[in-house]
Image: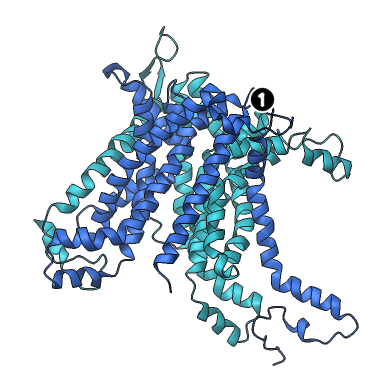
Amino acid sequence: MTTTVTTAGGTAGPRADRPAPSAPALLRARRWLGRNALRIYGAIAFAYLFTPIAYITVFSFNDGGRSNLVWRGFTLKNWANPCGAPEVCSAVGNSLKIGLTATVIATVLGTMVAFALGRHRFRGRTATNLVLFLPMATPEVVLAASLLTLFLQMAPIGIRLGVTTIVIAHVMFCLSFVVVTVKARIAGLDPRLEQAAADLYATEWQTFRRITLPLVAPGIAGGALLAFSLSFDDFIITNFVSGNVNTFPKFVYVSAQRGIPAQAYVIGAFMFFLALTIVLVADIVRRRRAPK
Amino acid sequence: MAIASVTHTGPAAPPPVPAGRSRSLTPYLLLLPGIAWLTIFFVVPIVTLFGTSLQVPAEGGETGVFVQAFRFANYVDAVTEYWAQFSRSFVYAGIATVLALAIGYPLAYMIAFKAGRLRNLLLVLVVAPFFASFILRTIAWRQILADEGFVVSSLKWLHVIPQTATVTASAVAVVAGITYNFLPFMTLPLYASLERIDPRLLEAGSDLYGNGFTVFRKVTFPLSLPGVVAGTLLTFIPAAGDYVNAALLGRQPGTAMIGNVVESRFFRIVDYPTAASLSFVLMAAILLLVFLYIRKAGTEELV
């Protein structure tokens, strides 16, 4: 066979092995490109992912008044007073309140379901999995339409669209995501740790409290974080079931017609950098605690 | 109880059950609140939606009052009238899914195999745009690509695009917006399945004289298929039902998707039966596609 065996790290193939004394610089450049093509691609892809974020950040410093469409000069006053546009802050407040409530409920219920699925045998497992899978496989607009029809039919018994209906809807679509996240963590646990605890005369509850729960905690935290970000950023379902209650995404969508105040950009940029900081700090802490 | 009899079948059968817990009611108590929530606020509404989809306007009634008539022809009417929006939704979502796969696969590959110590950081960065509001990011794109914006005017100045061209308010803008917004949904599962691949398998591939491309085609790609399936579903499903991108980036009837129709039937025209039939057809079509796709791709468990 004539195939050349590629040397370690050299993915450039036979061409790289052929001597080309006339243009070593060109060859080196080409090799470098071959080796780093994916990294260059990655840089471009990340630039693409972050283009709107950069725009949002830059325009949060714009002295653009209510519409914020063209650059009118740098100012810090939007950041100094993010409640300068009054509806922005009440909408963010609603979103936070709804997000936190829905996250707590969805995380508790979802974790319980995940433990049932990951630690117990029972009849009706297939049906349970189906009921958990379907909300994830259904487009949001369908969930939204179905909930709204239900709530409208329940209007005679005193159900009004508002914060409660939004929380109900958010728990519903966050629940499955919490279950999936926590279940994955439970499935990855080493069963010997729990056996060891039982061997050391720990009661079932002690084992759960001291061994299982701390080990599953990162999964629960991950599920909660996912639920909160899904809830905080949800627009389609919220728009259907919110009545006249405003949330942050709804506020941005509605004001898109006449121009979005710079304060909304401040909130967007702030949430982005806050989330990034939290995740990075958590990562550093985890690495410090578990040095390899 | 009958559950007790199934508990101790074979030691290897998943999931592992610690001894002593099997006979109890515990699993049912754990399931009860969550599953009850999903039953009341997912299953019941879907049934209600189906009921609504068969209603007709009450005779002589006001707007928004409907009576049950089991009129299955509602479906025929809805699909005939909005066939264009239906097919457009699936075409846009399909193109966006393929684009997201083309952009996301090399990105996930790079993070899994070439990022070294930066791996975790880059993974966080893929998800990070999510936190700066979906709607706000879409509007940012609209502003960036606006006719009077920097990008379009530079491209016109360079004569890359004709002087009369507009980027926003077009099908291209809608598909681009969908692709951008759902790219992380594609990249994450791809990364998860690529990261799980044992590097020794790739080494074995090259030891057996496979060049880079052959190893990729015969080893890496087949092993990443679960990620491809999960990623395409997680992108396609929300994309087909989305109406935000079409509303903010399309802004014309020619780019309206089925979600836009459902929204306007509900809120502007107050025609619940048509909105309900359209939603139901969308859901059924997507579930059918998902089912066929999973069967073809041969991935048994997604959840």
Q: Is mark 1 on a helix, strand or loop?
A: loop
Image colour assigned to chain A: blue
Does residue A290 appear in the picture of this structure? yes
Q: In the depicted view, which residue is nearer to us: B187 or B42?
A: B187
Q: Who is closer to the viewer here, B50 or B13?
A: B13
Q: In which quarter of the image is the N terminus of chain A?
A: bottom right
Residue B87: x, y in percent?
A: 59, 39
Q: Is residue A25 above or below residue B142?
A: below
Q: In this view, does A195 lie to the left or right of A134?
A: left
Percent of width and height locating residue B185: 52, 51
Residue at the extreme left: B1
Screen quadrant of the C terminus of chain A: bottom left
Of the chain colours in the picture, the one used for chain B is cyan
Nearest to the observer: residue B151 or residue B164 = B151
Q: Mark 1 points at which residue?
A: A67
- The residue shown at (18%, 69%) is A197
Q: Which amino acid does label 1 sit on?
A: Ser
In the rendered image, is residue A127 in sight? Answer: no
